[in-house]
Image (cartoon, rainbow, N blue to C red):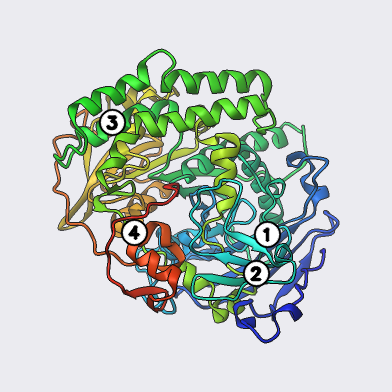
Amino acid sequence: MYAIQAVAVSALAGFASASLPPTPKDVIIKHIPSVPGASISYKETFICGKNAKSFAGYVHMPSSYLKDVQDVDYPYNASYFFWFYEARNNPRHAPTTIYLAGGPGDSGEFGVTSDGGPCNILADSNTTESNPWSWNENSNMLYVDQPLTTGFSYSTFVNSTLDLLFDHADPTQSGIVPFDAYHGSVPAENATFLYGALPIQDPTRTANNSVIAAHTLWHFAQLWFTEFPEYKTRNDRISFAGNSYGGYWVSTSAAYFQRQNKRIEAGEMEGKCLHLDSAVITNGCIDLLYQTEWYPQMAYNNTYNVSFITEQEYTESLYNWTKSGGGRDLILECRALGAAYDPNEFAINATVNEVCIEALGYGFAYVAGAYTATGRSAFDMAAFNPNPLPPDYVAGWANRAWVQEALGVPVNFTSTSNLVTNQFVYGSGDFVRRAGLPDVEYLLDEGVKVTLIYGDRDYRCPWLGVEQLSLQANWSGAEAFRKAGYEQIVVNGSYVGGVVRQYGGLSFSRVFQAGHDVSFYQPETSYHIFNRALANRDVASGRQSTVPKRHGTYSTHGPSDSYKWRETLPGSPAVECYTYAVSTTCTVDQAAALANGTAVIANFIVTKPGPGGGPIGGTGFA
């Protein structure tokens, strides 16, 4: 293993040294002889959830091991943080699920503490409670901070400042500045200007698209699944799960892992086959060529009987998609140029990147953009901006010294990496370049189950678009899936959580009264869908096997669309300004008070002034 770097703290003597994480201790280090310079460091943790063992640590990968995903002129080591939870039930015989958070750039700790994870963090950003609907009930869960600079993952880290009032206006900046850049005059720390040991903000030292991220994750998985001493299950089935941008992560990574399995089985390369079982996506964007045109429909004619845009705006938005040179044509041009000049999809051709970035910007502005003027949250149509839900309490919690000591990490926590977001949005246009539907089709034909779970109040990745994507997927069961109707999802004896269309290994679930993070809004419903899918049971009831039999394959029956099930929007949640998420949770007046030092703060929550001045807005990508 290459040594974990020691960051000099002498420059901090006398001011705010407590903001740096404590020196890791009681960490077990396992060297990997087959990969010189590689190692796994980890420790057992007890700080989130109960009734299951958990271990947090790093897979340290030298640049020589990652040559196929790095520029030869800019090699770098990679330390990927993971948090592994054994299943609460029978962990030695449970399958394992790799969880990938969204963003791009969100930490896997969102999965641990919000999106169906083992615990929930309370409003003091210091206390946790066990989640009774955790996805690790019957599956071992492996949460990974990826790409680099996300969460606790790093290549190199240095003493830096973090500006919580960073306005995201400059896509070349991230809000993190190394001490060296101040030439000896580091500004004083305050409630929104923090010191920390943070990953170096070098765009050449992280992924800038989903393909590079998937390749790097495969290298991580090869070491983790063969060398991590606490991985002891006899069940070698592996699934992927992810939320939001996790739609890209999961479809891309699962398909790449499966293709690598094929190469290993054919003797074309060495490695461990990682036998795939399921790809589970919650409110994820997967392929905007098939999803973008459904944003106007979501804003104008949804199942909540609320038209957020006018008929004229609806018509113009659709025209902006279909017209010559419009949104659809721009995506097709992006992909055609990519196939010709960047066929491996490593985002190495500047012209391709520029065209894809333009296509992305046009689609969000002129096809999906009319909704933004309503003042409603993209992540929950019931909420006005700023929207405090789901809370960002993990950012304050994971930056507490006692949490960092328990996890054995040498760096401060970055809940969402602005560097990664900038690279994917403004560096490669990955949102539109990545064609996820062919990967979904490939997985289904390979026998990998695909489970799509979508809250029906989400506008960031609306369920309507993914419903259409599922219907347009061409695979061996395509016609039977299209003929399948919707059935109700029975959650318990008194509650129906949504409706599902399913044939064999493919299911699409519309979950009632849920925003972008479906497991936050409807934890029991998402828990049952996840468990039923992994157990080869029908999503609707959990009572029928979905394993193909001689007399046929399981299918739902019912209406061909789900618009007959109508709901009523609840009221908007109260504003809660959180200092680690100023741009998305605070009003203009609250941000001004934070900037001039007059805000009253308790546990990272602004208690005075109250909300006023309207929303400030943020990047909108998560």
The one of 67 and 299 positioned closer to us in this rendering: 299
The one of 298 and 100 positioned closer to us in this rendering: 298
Residue 396 position (above or below residue 522): below
Tag 4, which secondary structure? helix
Q: Residue at x 70, y 31 (%)?
A: 348
Q: In the image, what residue type sits under mark 4?
A: Phe
User: At which x and y percent is residue 374?
Assistant: 25, 43
The residue pinned by badge 4 equals 520
Please identify the residue farthest to the bottom as the structure is shown.
14
Q: Is residue 129 visible?
A: yes
In the rendered view, does 221 fall on the left or right side of 242?
A: right
User: At which x and y percent is residue 229?
Assistant: 69, 66
Q: In the image, what residue type sits under mark 1?
A: Tyr
Tag 1, which secondary structure? loop
Numbered circles on residues, count: 4
User: At which x and y percent is residue 535?
Assistant: 41, 50
Q: Earlier in the sequence, mark 4 or mark 3?
A: 3
Q: CA distance from mark 1 to mark 2?
A: 8 Å
The residue pinned by badge 1 equals 154
Q: Earlier in the sequence, mark 2 or mark 3?
A: 3
| Callout 1–callout 2 Cβ contact below 8 Å | yes
Q: Residue at x 50, y 48 (%)?
A: 169
Residue 490 position (above or below residue 581): above
Tag 3, which secondary structure? helix
Residue 413 position (above or below residue 101): below
User: At which x and y percent is residue 116?
Assistant: 40, 60
Q: Earlier in the sequence, mark 2 or mark 4?
A: 2
* Quarter of the image where one finds residue 161: bottom right
In the rendered view, does 546 fall on the left or right side of 307?
A: right
The residue pinned by badge 2 equals 411
Q: Earlier in the sequence, mark 3 or mark 1?
A: 1
| Callout 4–callout 3 Cβ contact below 8 Å | no
